[in-house]
C-alpha cells in the first residue's frame, strides 16, 4: 500500500526514506519541497536523484484536498474555502485576516455530533473524524494560497476536537513542529463544547495552548436547549474542569458565549453567569449569533449587548465582543458546505 507522505515530522520521514535505501538527508529535501516550495509533483523535485523520484511515484502518495469553492468577504477580512478530501468528504476552513497576522480556523471532523442549535455543521450528524494530516492540509491550503505567514490556529470549525483526541493532539504537535508550521503553542486555541473527562486529560498534557469552552448559558436548563450534548455534563462540572485546566497549565480559559436574543442575553443571565464563575481567572468572548437560513434565532441589539458586557465588567470579568466577520460569505460552521451541496 502506498505511503502517504503528507503530514509527518522530519524524524518520521527520515525513518521512511532510510527504509527505502536512501540517506536520511533526502527527507529534509522532500519536506522542503512539500512545506516550503509547495511542489507536489514528484517529477519536479529535481534535487532528488532520479531513482528516488521513481520510488516516490511507485511507493508514495500525496493525499492533499482539492479546493472546491472560495468566498471572500466584502471587507477582505475573511476568506473561506471548501475542501474535498480523498474520500470525497467536504470540509470548511476559514482564514481571518487580522492586523497582527492570519488566523486559520480549522475543522476536526466531517460533520459533528454535538447538535448545537446554532450550527449548520451538525445538521447531518458526524460522518467521520479527520486525521492530523487532513487538519494540517487545511492550514497549508491557505498558506500556499496566501503566500503569507500564519500567525495563529483555532480548532473551532466543524466537529468537537476532544472526541477526536489523539489526532487533534498529533495535529497540534505537527503545527508546532519547526520543520512544518512552527506555530507557537500559545497561538493555538482549542474550542470544545465541554467534554469534561477530556478537559482533565488535556490539562495533563501540559501544553500551553488556549482552551476555549463553548459555555453559551449560565445554567443547565438553558444550556441543554442550546447544546444537547451538555445533558451529559453539568455546567458546574464544566466550570470545575476549566478551573483545573487553569491551575494545571497556568493558561487562562476563555468562555465562548453565543448571545441569542430572548434566550441567554438578559441582565439576569449575565448576573447568573457571574455567580457561576465566581472569582475564576477567565475571559468571556461574547458572540452575537450569526443569522442563518436554517434557524430562527437572532442577536440582541447593541443596547442589550452593552448592558450584558457592563454587568460582567462590574463583577471584574475580562470581556470582549467578537466582531462579526464573514456574515455575507456564510463563514459560520457548515454554511458554505450546505450551500455548495444545495447547488448540485
Image (cartoon, grey):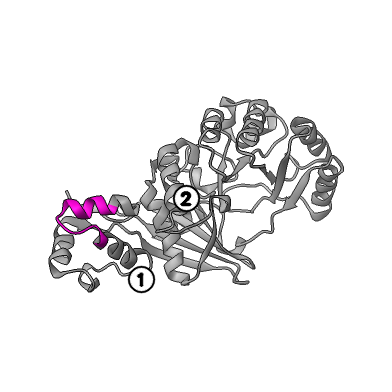
Query: Label 2, label 1: how many angstroms apart (C-alpha)?
Result: 25 Å
Magenta-highlighted residues? 13-25
| Res 169 quadrant in image | top left
- Is residue 19 shown left or right of residue 160? left
The residue singled out by tag 2 in the image is 107
Q: In percent of the image, x 47 and y 58: which residue is there?
A: 182
Are there few (<14), some (14-19), or many (20+) residues within 10 Å of tag 2? many
| Res 220 quadrant in image | top right
Q: How many marks?
A: 2
- Is residue 24 shown left or right of residue 182? left
- Is residue 138 shown left or right of residue 215? left
The image position of residue 76, as x and y in percent, is 59, 71
Q: Is residue 89 magenta?
A: no
Main structural element of the magenta stretch: helix, strand or loop? helix
Q: In percent of the image, x 68 and y 43: which residue is there?
A: 257
Query: From the viewer's perspective, is residue 272 above or below residue 41?
Result: above
Q: In percent of the image, x 33 and y 59: which residue is there?
A: 64
The image position of residue 159, as x and y in percent, is 48, 44
Which of the numbered marks, if any, corresponds to residue 37?
A: 1
Which circle, 2 or 1, is nearer the viewer?
1
The image position of residue 100, as x and y in percent, is 63, 65
The image position of residue 69, as x and y in percent, is 43, 65
| Helix, strand or loop for disc 1 | loop
| Helix, strand or loop for disc 2 | loop
| Res 38 quadrant in image | bottom left
Mark toward the start of the polypeptide (2 vs 1)? 1
Amino acid at each position: 500500500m502506498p505511503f502517504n507522505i503528507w503530514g509527518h515530522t522530519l524524524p518520521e520521514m527520515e525513518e521512511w526514506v532510510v527504509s527505502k535505501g536512501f540517506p536520511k538527508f533526502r527527507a529534509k529535501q522532500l519536506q522542503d519541497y512539500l512545506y516550503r516550495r509547495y511542489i507536489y509533483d514528484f517529477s519536479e523535485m529535481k534535487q532528488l536523484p532520479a531513482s528516488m523520484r521513481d520510488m516516490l511515484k511507485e511507493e508514495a502518495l500525496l493525499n492533499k484536498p482539492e479546493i472546491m469553492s472560495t468566498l471572500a468577504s466584502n471587507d477582505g477580512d475573511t476568506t473561506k474555502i471548501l475542501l474535498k478530501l480523498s474520500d470525497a468528504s467536504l470540509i470548511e476552513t476559514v482564514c481571518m485576516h487580522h492586523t497582527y497576522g492570519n488566523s486559520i480556523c480549522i475543522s476536526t471532523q466531517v460533520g459533528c455530533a454535538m447538535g448545537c442549535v446554532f450550527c449548520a455543521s451538525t445538521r447531518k450528524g458526524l460522518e467521520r473524524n479527520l486525521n492530523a494530516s487532513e487538519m494540517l492540509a487545511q492550514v497549508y491550503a491557505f498558506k500556499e494560497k496566501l503566500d503569507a505567514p500564519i500567525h495563529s490556529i483555532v480548532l473551532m470549525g466543524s466537529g468537537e476536537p476532544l472526541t477526536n483526541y489523539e489526532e487533534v493532539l498529533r495535529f497540534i504537535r505537527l503545527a508546532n513542529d519547526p520543520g512544518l508550521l512552527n506555530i507557537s503553542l500559545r497561538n493555538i486555541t482549542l474550542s470544545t463544547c465541554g467534554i469534561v473527562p477530556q478537559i482533565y486529560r488535556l490539562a495533563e498534557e501540559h501544553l500551553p495552548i488556549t482552551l476555549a469552552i463553548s459555555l453559551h448559558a449560565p445554567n443547565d436548563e438553558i444550556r441543554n436547549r442550546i447544546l444537547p450534548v451538555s445533558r451529559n455534563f453539568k455546567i458546574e462540572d464544566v466550570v470545575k474542569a476549566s478551573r483545573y485546566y487553569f491551575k494545571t497549565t497556568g493558561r487562562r480559559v476563555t468562555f465562548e458565549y453565543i448571545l441569542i436574543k430572548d434566550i441567554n442575553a438578559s441582565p439576569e443571565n449575565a448576573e447568573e453567569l457571574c455567580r457561576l464563575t465566581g472569582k475564576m481567572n477567565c475571559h468571556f468572548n461574547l458572540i452575537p449569533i450569526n443569522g442563518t437560513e436554517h434557524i430562527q434565532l437572532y442577536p440582541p441589539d447593541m443596547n442589550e449587548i452593552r448592558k450584558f458586557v457592563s454587568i460582567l465588567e462590574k463583577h471584574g470579568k475580562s470581556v470582549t465582543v467578537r466582531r462579526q466577520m464573514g456574515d455575507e460569505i456564510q463563514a459560520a460552521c457548515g454554511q458554505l458546505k450546505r450551500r455548495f451541496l444545495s447547488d448540485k
